[in-house]
Image (cartoon, helix red, strand yellow):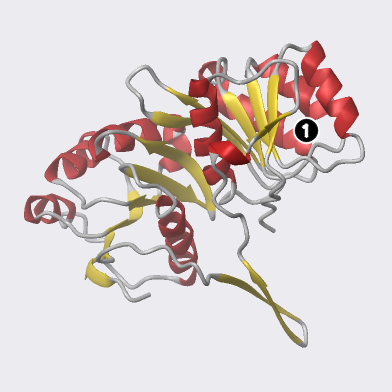
Amino acid sequence: TNAAVLHGKQLSFNNIVDGNSALELVKEFSRPTAAVIKHNNPCGVASADTLEEALKYAYEVDSMSAFVGVLALNRGCSADVAKFIGEKKWFLEIIIAPDFAPEALEMLMKNKNLRLLATGELRPNEESRDIKKVEGGILIQSQGGENVTAKDLKVVTVKAPTAREIQAMLFANKVVKHVHSNAIVFAKVLDDGAEVVTGIGAGQMSRVDAVFIGAHKGGDRVPGSVMASDAFFPFADGVEACAKAGAVAIIQPGGSIRDDEVVARADELGLAMVTTGVRLFRH
């Protein structure tokens, strides 16, 4: 809300909500990162050595859903970024970035409806709170979801994840924190080192349905991916759906009364699984 609006028509209620979600997601990452938000859920996220690479990969996750979305960048918007958006004829509601190169502004401002927001330097808010209105009052809680690192992971299966799979797991775990529950994120590390989401299942009433939708949206990108779950698996069916989609490893909080059954099924299917002990349920 303190960003400088450089161009475009007035922000709507939903614009501000979606913009906030997009910005909070990219603030999770130190590498150049691009995130596309649609209806308050991410539909494409990627981190890479350059912002231009990250944007390309984020767009390719789900270019159909990215249409009329909100784009957030954790680096300044360059002329190459603006050129990519123009070449793809990518219609966006908002672009949020720390700043915009003059050449980028010149290209982007040709779209009179596109809102351009410059935030200045991005700073994660360690005191962030989630506030919701209910009849007769409000609910306030800490956002939670501590920054899980490799040393926090507990390998619970016979098969241990590789270093590359752990890198993908930690990336996916940061993304799934920003997806509405029940939430599943598939992701992988590409040969060039980019960390890329390959499928997202959001806002489902059952976890296995979230896995199914994430796998369906990801399609041929999912095989070889890891899968992050925002909460534990109540049954082994989500693990079975993960294996069927071609994913190879799972990161999840753990804590189900059926954890032993879930882990045993992962072993039978040849999957690696780690638990974090940190629930990321975004309601």
Relative to 184, is 175 on the left or the right? left
Q: Which residue is tagged 1?
A: 208
Answer yes or no: is residue 141 visible.
Answer: yes
89 or 229: nearer the viewer? 229
| Mark 1: few/some/many CA within 10 Å (<14, 14-19, 20+) | many
Residue 20 image point, x, y percent: 45, 63
Q: Residue furthest front?
A: 151
Tally of marks: 1
Quarter of the image with the N terminus in it:
bottom left
Determine the residue positioned at 35% across, 44% down: 34
User: Which secondary structure, mark 1?
Assistant: helix
Residue 78 image point, x, y percent: 16, 47
- The quarter of the picture where residue 262 lies is top right
Determine the residue positioned at 56% across, 51% down: 178
Relative to 203, is 78 on the left or the right? left
Relative to 173, is 280 on the left or the right? right
- Vertical arrangement, residue 51 with respect to residue 146, above or below: above
Quarter of the image with the C terminus in it:
bottom right
Q: Amino acid at mark 1?
A: Val
